[in-house]
Amino acid sequence: MKFMYQTYKPLFNKHISNQLNNAADRLGKKLNQLKIAELAISQYNAQYLAHDHLNNLTSTLQKYVYILGSCIQSTQLPINEITFLEYGGGIGILSLLAREAGVKSVLYNDIYNISVQDAQNIATHLGLTANHYIPGDIDDVINYLKNNNIACHAVGSYDVIEHVYDIDVFLKKLSSLSKAKNFTLFMSSGANTLNPRIKNKLIKHHHEHEYQTRQTTSGHKQRDCLEGFLSVRRNIIKEYAPALSDAELNHLAQATRGKIKNDIYTTIDTYKKNKLLPAIPITSDTCDPHTGNWSEHLLDPYHLKNILYKQGLNAQVLCGYYGHQSRTIKKYVCNLFNACITFAPTTLALRLAPFYTIYGKKN
């Protein structure tokens, strides 16, 4: 099937595979007919839709079929009885697929208000509007579900967890999001720290965000800071504690790498009290000091698994697969990798996998 990963073992039962493959085929045709310039969406999401999704739409839809199908199969419910939440949805393709597939109730969420508006505009244009659009973070989602008496059966996402500021707190809250029977979490991330190729690429990405001031380009996401994060933290510290020496200021700016503004203040207050300079982190990971948005946080997936396990979920780390490739050589190599990922032990397969998934199920 065109929209199923070439995994050499069936991922889903035949019924789910057929339903989702047909839904992805219909959605793909609708997306290919979109005239992006005529959509009432931001330049940021217009470029994201064109460059990151439509340029290789088959691969994009394979990824979301994998996530949605895994959620559906885990709940053990018919598609038309499932309430599904796309967390951190961006332009909302996973929500679009869920609606096209006939999921009973689809909820979309993103922390960026502009993305919420754009996702809704795209969905309306395609006739695939989600049942609920929820702007905000995990606390906003929890409150919305509580106030509207909604119990989710499944939560899915791609490339979200590596941006969450406090992932431990987030996963604990997410685990208690719903009391629905067989509640399922299926959250995938391309920031696979166990794949050496990906890790090296992202370390360079971290250094760029930490030390370089980037230029404003067409389609820039207004929420994201372009100034080097080290410089931002230095200015935050200097404004908060102007009496510090240059040496103290420089050390604290380095030592607060990966901290949001309020936590930077706490570090400074602690230093003023005990006069002990904190250690400088040895990892490359860094985040925007204003929003806490990590630059592709290289998380240990097994640590995330343990968090879910402690919250009473049966948890696993799963390997992602390589999607459709138009060039023959790349297609051959990716199919070979998928075969290795399918049959190798997970700890070894993760070294090849393009992404990983944290899967949790409440019994």
Image: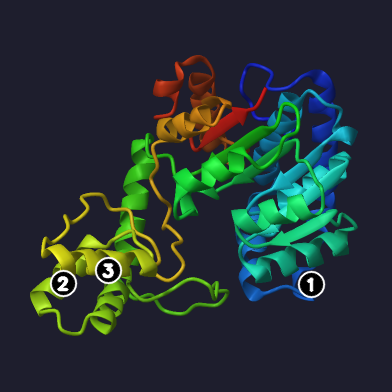
- First of labels 3, 2 by sequence position: 3
Q: Residue at x 24, y 69 (%)?
A: 269
Q: Earlier in the sequence, mark 2 or mark 1?
A: 1
Q: Position of residue 347 (x, y in %)?
A: 40, 22
Q: Position of residue 107 (x, y in %)?
A: 77, 51
**Which label lies toward us, 3 or 2?**
2
Using residue 154 as the reference point, say whether residue 170 is left or right of it. Answer: left
209 or 186, which lies in front?
A: 186
Q: What residue sits 11% from the left and 65% below the top?
A: 275
Residue placed under numbered mark 1 in the picture: 39
Which residue appears at 78% of the width and 75% of the height? 40
Q: CA distance from mark 2 to mark 1?
A: 46 Å
Question: Looking at the picture, which amino acid does disc 2 mark?
Answer: Asn
Q: Mark 3 to mark 1: distance in Å?
A: 36 Å
Instruction: Give above or below for 154 relative to 41.
Output: above
The C terminus sits in image quarter: top right
Q: CA distance from mark 3 to mark 2?
A: 13 Å
The residue mark sitting in front, 2 or 1, is: 2
Seen in the image, is 39 located left or right of residue 81? left
- Residue 183: numbered disc: none
* Label 3: which secondary element: helix
- Figure quadrant of residue 38: bottom right
Q: Position of residue 42 (x, y in %)?
A: 67, 74
**Could you tell me which secondary element the residue under label 1 belongs to?**
loop
Give the crowd class for mark 2: few <14, some 14-19, many >=20 residues within 10 Å: some
Picture quadrant of residue 36: bottom right
Where is residue 13, by image quadrant?
A: top right
Q: Check disc 3 and report the residue beneath it.
A: 211
| Residue in the image at 28% along x and 80% along y | 240
Determine whether 136 is above or below 14 in the image. Answer: below
Instruction: Report x, y in % for residue 67.
Output: 67, 36
